[in-house]
Amino acid sequence: VAGGSLLLIPLSCGLFGIPNEIAMQVVAVGFIISVVQDSAETGLNSSTDVVFTAAVSGYRR
């Protein structure tokens, strides 16, 4: 499950007596961070593909 660890936050907050509203805010922040992280990973992966392709292309000339 994507973001499955975020589902454990309300459970752990409940164990420590933290209100459910705060737990949901923490889940929302975690979700936003995961979206930004996924976008950054995709961009980095694409940029390294370009670098490797350029390196191989230059090597064959």
Image (tube, grey):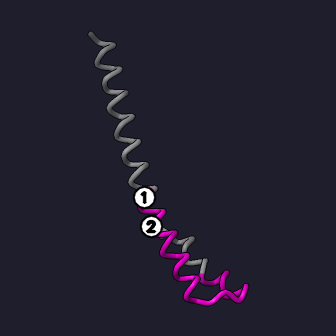
State whether residue 47 is above or below residue 52: below
Q: Residue furthest left?
A: 61
Secondary structure found at label 2: helix
Which range is magenta?
A: 10-36
Task: Name the image quarter holding residue 26.
Answer: bottom right
Q: Would you say the residues marked 2 and 1 are in contact, meaning their CB atoms lie under 8 Å apart?
A: yes
Q: Amino acid at mark 1?
A: Val
Residue at image point 71% right, 86% down? 15
Q: Residue furthest top?
A: 61
Q: Is residue 16 magenta?
A: yes
Q: Which residue is mark 1?
A: 36
Q: For this rendering, which residue is in front, 46 or 29? A: 29
Q: Is residue 24 magenta?
A: yes
Q: Residues within 10 Å of mark 2 (few under 14, many from 20)?
A: few
- Left or right: where does residue 17 sit relative to residue 45? right
Q: Which residue is mark 2?
A: 32
**Label 2 to label 1: alpha-carbon separation:** 6 Å
Q: For this rendering, which residue is in front, 28 or 50? A: 28
Q: Quadrant of the C terminus?
A: top left
State whether residue 49 is above or below residue 40: above
x then y, percent, for residue 60: 29, 12
- Left or right: where does residue 27 sit relative to residue 13? left
Q: Amino acid at mark 2?
A: Ile
Secondary structure found at label 1: helix
Task: Name the image quarter holding residue 6.
Answer: bottom right
* Mark number displayed over residue 4: none
Residue at image point 42% right, 62% down? 35
Q: Residues within 10 Å of mark 1 (few under 14, many from 20)?
A: few
Residue at image point 28% right, 19% down? 57
Magenta stretch prevailing secondary structure: helix
